[in-house]
Image: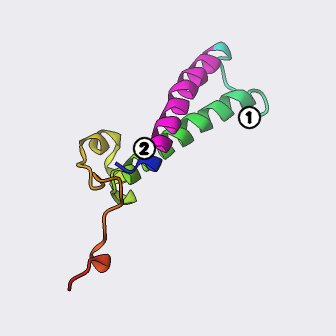
Amino acid sequence: MIPAYKRKARIAGLVSVVTLPAFLWWSGQHPGPSTWEDNPVSGVLGFLAVATSSYACYAYVKAKGRSVVWLYLGPLVLLLLKDHAKDGQPPKHVSEVDWA
């Protein structure tokens, strides 16, 4: 895995793991129909939970040396992907391979 992306995925995953329960707790404390004007904290926490979990998946795919297209298959499939960057370097594309 590529260390820089692996670190980013871990940090984003940690932030996501903290913000999702905070969002659920805050929403439970303020039940009923709410708008952005009534309860902006809930909106911010919800956005952070979604954004950080999405970025964590993106960074995880990049750390494995894969294309971003793999994100469409879902987070469970991402865990099963083989590592294409075992030496810590991104894989060479066909156009970059020295054919000589």
**Residue at the image point whose x is 35% and y is 41% from the top:** 75
Q: Which mark is residue 6?
A: 2
| Dot 2 amino acid type | Lys
Farthest-out residue, top: 29
Between 34 and 93, which is closer to the camera in this rendering?
93
**Residue at the image point whose x is 64% and y is 31% from the top:** 45
- Name the spot of residue 36 as percent of width and height, x first: 74, 34
**Residue at the image point whose x is 27% and y is 75% from the top:** 94
- Mark 2 nearby-residue class (10 Å; few <14, some 14–19, many ≥20): some
- Name the spot of residue 71 as percent of width and height, x first: 37, 51
| SS type, badge 1 | loop
Q: Mark 1 or mark 2: which is in front?
A: 2
Residue 67 horizontal side relative to residue 21, left or right: left
- Mark 1 nearby-residue class (10 Å; few <14, some 14–19, many ≥20): few
The quarter of the picture where residue 38 lies is: top right
**Residue at the image point whose x is 31% and y is 79% from the top:** 95
The quarter of the picture where residue 46 lies is: top right
Give the mark nearest the N terminus, 1 or 2. 2
Between 25 and 12, which is closer to the camera in this rendering?
12
- Name the spot of residue 97 as percent of width and height, x first: 27, 77
Image quadrant holding the C terminus, namely: bottom left
- Magenta: main secondary structure equals helix
| SS type, badge 2 | helix
- Name the spot of residue 40 as percent of width and height, x first: 74, 31
Farthest-out residue, right: 37
Residue 63 horizontal side relative to residue 94, left or right: right
Residue that label 1 marks = 36
Q: Is residue 29 above or below residue 80?
A: above
Highlighted magenta segment, given as a residue range: 6-28
Residue 74 among magenta residues: no
